[in-house]
Image (cartoon, grey):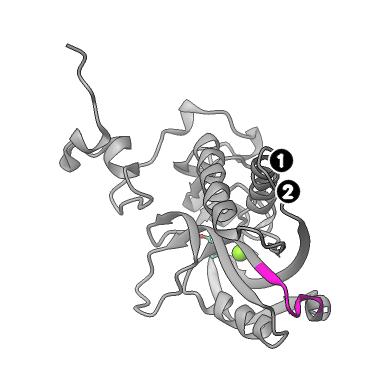
Amino acid sequence: MLQCWGRWSVPREHGGFLSTFSSKLISDDWPGYSLDLFTYPQHYYGDLEYVLIPHGIIVDRTERLAKDITQDIGDNDIVVLCVLKGGYKFCADLVEHIKNLSRNSERFISMKVDFVRLKSYHNDKSMEDMQIMGEDDLSDLRGKNVLIVEDIIGTGRTMKALLNNIEKCEPKMIKVASLLVKRTSQPDGFRPDYYGFEIPDIFVVGYALDYNEHFRDLNHICVINDQGKAKYRV
Ligand code: HPA
Ligand code: MG
């Protein structure tokens, strides 16, 4: 008889891929994947500890988020507000998936894409002051359905500040999609409407997430090691 290996049949204590990824939560003891299993730019050899989320899984998860968002959008047109720089890869892939889904459906969702740029990290530490750039155009958001697309939400302080600014423009609706949410010690941490994965409270790079502008050209989401941090410290 054909045996069905349902994902819930793998005992949690066995660890490994299925138990760790059976939800969108990546546990603190997830060892990640060896770098030897994948390809990555040679200029980062020796600078990374392990792969936390391979590129293929990011893209597949993004496709599912696009499906969820498309279903929720219904008949509404949206303005996608991409938070630069880290959000550009996730936003581009998400918009592409939404476009493909809507092309094959009854109604083509009209999407405008706009950008806002935030800077709040120095080395791997969050700074008190968050700078918002490109916010002059936010008044265009009045009466619109806005989907904010972000790479990662840590303490949520940055997102709350951005939401405060956007709310002043009186959009009709605001939803937030973040590829990653960090499990920080903040009890009042911000929860986006959509997110790809909840990850441990560690500093990650790749898929447009940077460490002092480096590692955006890495496809997988990885953890950097001490050598990488020292090499690109400013
Ligand atoms: N990596 C890159 N940028 C970030 C992170 C991170 O882990 N957390 C918040 N911004
Ligand atoms: Mg970001």
- Residue 130 spot, x, y in % from top left: 64, 80
Residue 141, magenta (yes or no): yes
- Is 223 situated left or right of 217 in this image? left
Q: Which amino acid does label 1 sit on?
A: Arg
Is residue 127 or residue 111 the one in the foreground? 111
Give the residue at x 52% y 38%: 60
Res. 62 in view = yes
Identify the secondary structure beneath mark 1.
helix
How many dots with numbers? Answer: 2
Q: Which of marks 1 and 2 is nearer the N terminus?
A: 1
Quadrant for ligand 2 reads bottom right
**In the image, which disc is placed on residue 176?**
none
- Residue 175 spot, x, y in % from top left: 58, 68
Identify the secondary structure beneath mark 2.
loop
Res. 217 in view = no
Q: Which span is picked out in magenta?
A: 140-146
Residue placed under numbered mark 2 in the picture? 108
**In the image, which disc is placed on residue 103?**
1
Residue 41, magenta (yes or no): no
